[in-house]
Amino acid sequence: VILKKQKNPIGGYFELELNSHRNKLDKWGVAYQSARASLYALIKQKKCERIWLPKYICGCVIPPIESLDIEILKYDIDLDFRIKSKIPLRDTDLLLYVNYFGICDLQEEELISEYTADQIIFDHSQAFYSRPKDVAATIFSPRKFFGLPDGGFLYTNTVIEDEYEVDTDSIERSKFLLTRLSSGAEAGYNEFKIADESLNDFYPKKMSTLTRKLLSSVDIDSVKTQRNINFNYLHSRLKKINELVIPNNINAPLCYPLLIRLDGLRDFLIKNKLFIAKYWPDVMESVDSGSVEDILVNNLLAIPCDQRYQEKDMNDIIDLIFIGINEIKHNNI
Ligand SMILES: Cc1ncc(COP(=O)(O)O)c(C=O)c1O
């Protein structure tokens, strides 16, 4: 007799062993394969006519919007990440603002007091730990904060159609996670690029079972603590050379953004194996040289402060930065 009750097999071979933190993913909203897909799902439902985007943004958010035939208007920001001049927002417009590097909660509060909250989208792709505010929507990209193959969340009070199928591509996208673990960063980079590019397909799919299980197993609170510790330590040692104003209260940011106008420092750091991402080179195609965006693209160094690292690693980074500065200044004399 076969009993229907016992659905899952017991015993046999093992799966990848994960912690069981059992995070409830629903608190970040509806789960998709990427932040881009979340944005598409939202805008499709909102049916706006135009959307305002900062010039300083990842180019990957553009195709999903264009595919929905929505007019894109661009705005400037200042070096303090505030919108430069008042936006003439029409009733049928949306305004998207990026919580840059996860340090712009205050700027978000200001925007809510200035514009209609229901027309604002906050992009928390770089601010996973900043709580969503009472606006039209907040999007998240957890893979920027944890070792995940993909993932995106849409936190919104708009009712979203539940028409999308479940993503089954995460296994294919996961190879870089195992390669980095076993053979190091350089070995896995190509696989990471391939996985990353596969997310250009923005048509929404529900977050895969694999990504859900991986994210459920992350120790969200201890990651937060370690990021804050590392960030504050970097700031205590680097604030004297950082042109950016960093807020006192932070929420486990993406990285420590260090703005220092010294050509060659990024290359020096990369040559010495400090891998720092450049946000976002394609912005340069449409901004003037000397503009705020130019300065941010070319002179902002995204220093890692994530949960893999401790104070010793932060000291190594700081030493390297000061050695680099001295070397470049010395060679320029
Ligand atoms: C500000 C910003 N928004 C959106 C995205 C897109 O995130 P995802 O790769 O999850 O689609 C990125 C990252 O690439 C980003 O930096």
Image: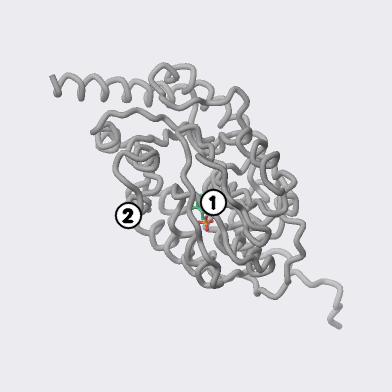
| Ligand 1 contact, mark 1 (Cβ < 8 Å) | yes
Q: Which residue carries the number 1 mark? A: 143
Q: In this view, does 121 lie to the left or right of 126?
A: right
Image disc number at residue 285: 2
Residue type, label 2: Glu
Number of marks in picture: 2
Q: Is mark 2 on a helix, strand or loop?
A: helix
The kind of residue tagged 1 is Arg
| 170 lies left or right of 261 | right
* Residue 306 position within the rendered picture, expressed as x and y whole percent measured from the top left: 51, 35
Q: In this view, does 321 lie above or below 200?
A: above
**Would residue 136 be found to the left or right of residue 3 on screen?**
left
Residue 331 visible in the shown view:
yes
Q: Residue 80 carries which label?
A: none
Compared with residue 68, is residue 34 higher up or lower down, i.e. above or below? above
Q: Residue at horizontal 73%, vertical 56%? A: 156
Residue drawn at point x = 41 percent, y = 56 percent = 192
Query: Percent x, y for residue 153?
Result: 64, 56
Near mark 1 (Cα within 10 A), the count class, few <14, some 14-19 or many ≥20, is: many
| Residue found 46% across the figure and 59% down from its top | 60
Q: Does the rendering let one see residue 223?
A: no
